[in-house]
Amino acid sequence: MEAMDKKEFDFFELLRIVLKNRKFIIIFVAVVSLGAVIYSLLTPQIWESSASFYVVGDQASALPINIEGLSGITSQLLGGDNAQNAINSVTAMSSRGFSEDVIRHFRLIQYYKITESDSLMAMDKALKRLRKKTVSIDYSTDTGLVSVSAETKRKKLSRDMVDYYLQKLETYNREQKLTKGKMNREFLEGRVRATEAEIDSLLYAVKDFQTRHNAIDIETQTESLISSYSDVIATKMQTDIELELARKNYAPDSPVVAELKSRSDALGRQIRELEAGGGALKPRYLIDIASLPDLGTQFAQLKMNLEIQSKVFEFLYPQFEAARLEELRDMPTLDILDTPREAGMRVRPKRAMLCLIAFALALVAAVIIALIKNAFELNKDRFREIKKEL
């Protein structure tokens, strides 16, 4: 007995135990392997569709800062990079609102067979399933590539979901994201249209005046004085436009806003002094105009207003065109590298791998059971003593 206890366990002993229990081991492994095969055949097939793209949006300033009178204000209003655009796109697609829209569009609560009567709880469960098991959204910091993939039980559903994400992201970038370029373009467009309408009205008035009164003209000196006065007013209007544009992009207490406000006030005081006849530049042309015949005064006023509006238009229109270009450059677009398509091979279940793993685990488990059984048989006396003590 003592010699048996000191006998070491070796490979041949293991082989003897396996051969002794070979019938059990074969049956156990066969049953588990058959169960794995049946499971792999009955479990739903999962199909994946994916797409990858870059988010392109050159947001460097495109406004013509070398235009006389611009003062460099507008060139500071815009900025950004493609990496931030990509991060924003990933954040948007991962948002709750984005995900809920996908769930409603594809009726995923029914797809997941969620039977909760509480609609909010059902939506929360669907969101959890969507984010953890169905949709994957990744962003590579090294390459800037954004990828979206969907895994469902139907090939077409997987492809349609990825395609819907791309379409919805395009819509978000085009319609919902208010960029600074768009804001500036809308502001400048309104001013340009108003100035154009004013110029058209003045041109018609001048033509009508000349037709009715045989083209009455103003003396050359009066024209020169009117031009000088219109320059001051045009500068004031340009400054006011820059001030209003700055207020849309900076805080009210910003130094940029304060500087433009101070400049506008100074020009306003200068205009009031000129109109009142005070200051260093006495508006002599006002006296001359008052002494002119009434028709001459009217024509001079029309010409002066037309010149002011023309100079304002010369200032505004390049800004408007630059803002239109800036809006297009500022709006992120998707440069799609891989378009979504229906999968040719399923991603799950991997039947061969599943059966091999089940076979290996069953074999190991059967051997362990045989060893435990053999240990019980070799130590029957000890177990009897333990049972007696219990």
Image: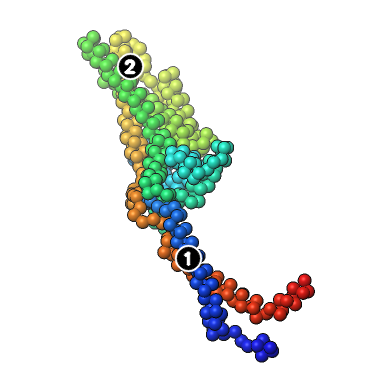
Number of numbered markers: 2
Amino acid type at circle 1 is: Ser
Q: Residue furthest right?
A: 389
- Residue nearest the observer in this picture, 279 or 140: 140
User: Dividing the picture into quarters, in which one does residue 105 lie?
Assistant: top left
Q: Which residue is mark 1?
A: 33
Q: Establish if 219 lies above or below 171.
A: above
Q: Is residue 95 left or right of residue 383?
A: left
Amino acid type at circle 2 is: Gln
Q: Is residue 67 left or right of residue 381?
A: left
Q: Which mark is residue 301?
A: 2
User: Dividing the picture into quarters, in which one does residue 380 lie?
Assistant: bottom right
Whether residue 241 is visible here, answered yes or no, is yes
- Residue nearest the observer in this picture, 173 or 316: 173
- Residue 165 at x, y = what percent? 41, 44
User: Looking at the rendering, in which quadrant would you find the C terminus?
Assistant: bottom right
Local crowd size for mark 1, using a 10 Å CA cut-off: few (<14), some (14–19), many (≥20): many
Q: Establish if 149 lies above or below 353.
A: above
Q: Establish if 58 lies above or below 354.
A: above
Q: Is residue 260 left or right of residue 340?
A: right
- Residue 316 at x, y = what percent? 34, 31
Mark 1: which secondary structure?
Answer: helix
User: Looking at the rendering, in which quadrant would you find the N terminus?
Assistant: bottom right
Mark 2: which secondary structure?
Answer: helix
Q: CA distance from mark 1 to mark 2?
A: 100 Å
Whether residue 279 is visible here, answered yes or no, is no
Q: Which mark is residue 18?
A: none
Q: Residue drawn 50% across and 72% down?
A: 26
Q: Residue drawn 58% across and 72% down?
A: 369
- Residue 253 at x, y = what percent? 54, 35
- Residue nearest the observer in this picture, 221 or 264: 264
